[in-house]
Image (cartoon, rainbow, N blue to C red):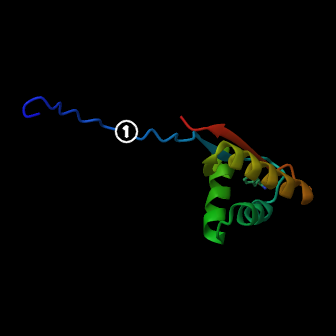
């Protein structure tokens, strides 16, 4: 019927759940040799030599360094794998995780 139609526009906004990201953080210690830190970074985080060396030096100089950012479960799994790699090499090398702001 002319003039009686309603002209309703429905806007649908897709709400996509964005999972919170968690940082994997490398902690400095006094005992792990530098080359062991580099080996673990390369194997656990697929970093190249230059990137691993830079992260190692930052942790050594500042006390810690963010290695990578993942969803919580992947960050925790990666940190555990890297900690186990350090233990296998008989070092106290430690990776932790924390949520991003
Ligand atoms: N501080 C260690 C040393 O002098 C090297 C090191 C660097 C250890 C970074 C841990 O996350 C680390 N042998």
* Ligand 1 is within 8 Å of the C-beta of the residue at disc 1: no
Q: Residue at the location (69% across, 61% down)? A: 45
Locate residue 82 relative to residue 90 in the image: left or right. Answer: left
Residue 60 % position (x, y):
69, 51
Q: Position of residue 85 (x, y in %)?
A: 84, 58
Q: Where is residue 90, by image quadrant?
A: bottom right
Residue 72, picture quadrant:
top right
Residue at (82, 55) in percent of width and height: 32
* Left or right of residue 11: residue 1: left
Would residue 68 be found to the left or right of residue 2 on screen? right
Q: Nearer the viewer, residue 45 or 41?
A: 45
Residue at the farthest left position: 3
What SS does tag 1 mark?
Answer: loop
Q: Is residue 61 above or below residue 45?
A: above
Circle 1 sits on which residue?
A: 13
Q: Residue 16: percent from the left, percent from the top?
A: 48, 42
How crowded is the residue under tag 1: few (<14 C-alpha within 10 Å), some, or many (20+)? Answer: few
x, y percent for residue 101: 53, 34
The answer to which of 19 and 91 lies nearer the viewer is 19
Of the 4 image quadrants, the one containing the N terminus is top left
Residue found at the far bottom of this picture: 49
Q: Nearer the viewer, residue 83 or 16?
A: 16
Question: Total label count?
Answer: 1
Q: Which residue sits at x=67%, y=44%?
A: 63
**Left or right: residue 42 compared with residue 9:** right
Residue at 86% x, 49% y is 92
């Amino acid at each position: 019927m002319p003039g009686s139609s309603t002209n309703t526009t429905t806007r649908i906004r897709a709400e996509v759940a964005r999972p919170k990201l968690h940082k994997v953080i490398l902690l400095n210690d006094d005992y792990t040799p530098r080359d062991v830190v580099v080996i673990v970074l390369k194997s656990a985080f697929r970093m190249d030599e230059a990137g691993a060396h830079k992260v190692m030096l930052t942790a050594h100089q500042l006390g810690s360094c963010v290695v990578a950012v993942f969803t919580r479960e992947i960050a925790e799994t990666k940190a555990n794998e890297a900690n186990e790699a350090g233990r296998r090499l008989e070092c106290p090398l430690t990776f932790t995780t924390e949520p991003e702001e």
